[in-house]
Image (cartoon, helix red, strand yellow):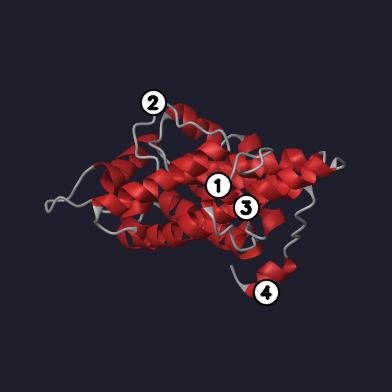
Amino acid sequence: MTEDSMTDTDIDTTDPAYHSARAALYAATAGAFVYPDEEALTELRSQDAVEGIERAADRLGLGTEARRFTEALAEADLSDLQSAYTDLFGLPTDDGTYPVVPYEGNYTAGEEVDKQQRRIAAVVGLLETVGLEPSESFGERQDHVATELELLQVAAGQRAVVTDRADDPSDNEVAGEIQGIEAAALSNHLAPFVPAMAHDLRATTDCEVYLAAANLAEALVEFDDAVHPDPPTSPDELSPPGVTAR
């Protein structure tokens, strides 16, 4: 996202609709990076979903990226999409590596397993602060790109709710706590991860759905990271919304 487009974007962090728009785009991109099935694909390209994605993207100045994504979804064949997902994320190459790795730890911690485990633990801690527990049917590591995007979806949705009722001073405090969680997730996890993964996808695949999803996710994360303040410096400052850190 360019500085000019960001200047033209309606950024009002006191408006619940702004956070609802963020949540909608995080939901859409998270949904794009799980194994596609007929139900998920039908839901993503339903008229309500497409209109919601495009409306949210227009609010954040990401309309071009979102329309490329929704147009790619409209033209996608399920079996081709499943094959592309497996080729990208599901099967190792002859040398035992994967064409594109969907796990943050591999980008932010390299190949050192202990460092990867610490990154995963940090993500789990953030998931717990927003009350998000990965589905038992989701058999991936918890630093999977879809999980981290869903983390921001849930946090943005919570922020929309508390911003909508912010007449109570305690709700303003809760909104600030959620903002700190978002800032930590963005600065420490998604910002150094999602653009790098998007780069790898662009270098690896010609599947338009995954190219468009990567571009939208990258633009969303870079935009959101830029408008958030610096994250809290101490993990103790990150506590579940509405709970004072001890």
Type of amino acid under label 4: Asp
Viewer-side label of 1, 2: 2
Q: Which residue is mark 3?
A: 180
> Closer to us: mark 4 or mark 1?
4
Q: Of marks 1 and 2, which one's residue comes earlier in the chain?
A: 1
Look at mark 1 in the image and give the residue it sits on. Answer: 70
Name the residue tied to disc 4.
4
Amino acid type of disc 3? Gly
**Among all residues in the image, which is located at the extreme front?**
246
Q: Which of pointers 3 and 2 lies earlier in the amino acid sequence?
A: 2
Residue at the image position 36 percent from the left and 59 percent from the top = 108
Element carrying mark 4: helix
Q: Nearer the viewer, mark 3 or mark 2?
A: 3
Q: Residues within 10 Å of mark 2 (few under 14, many from 20)?
A: few
Label 4 vs 1, first from the N-terminus: 4
What's the CA distance linking mark 4 and mark 2? 42 Å
Q: Is residue 149 above or below residue 59?
A: above
In the shown orientation, is residue 84 left or right of residue 185? left
Residue holding disc 2: 137
> Is residue 113 at all visible to an observer of this figure?
yes
| Mark sitting earlier along the chain (1/3) | 1
Q: In this rendering, which labeled residue sits more in front, label 4 or label 3?
A: 3
Relative image position of residue 172 (x, y in whole percent): 78, 46
The 10 Å Cα crowd at callout 1, few under 14, some 14 to 19, many 20 or more, is many
Kind of residue sitting beneath label 1:
Thr
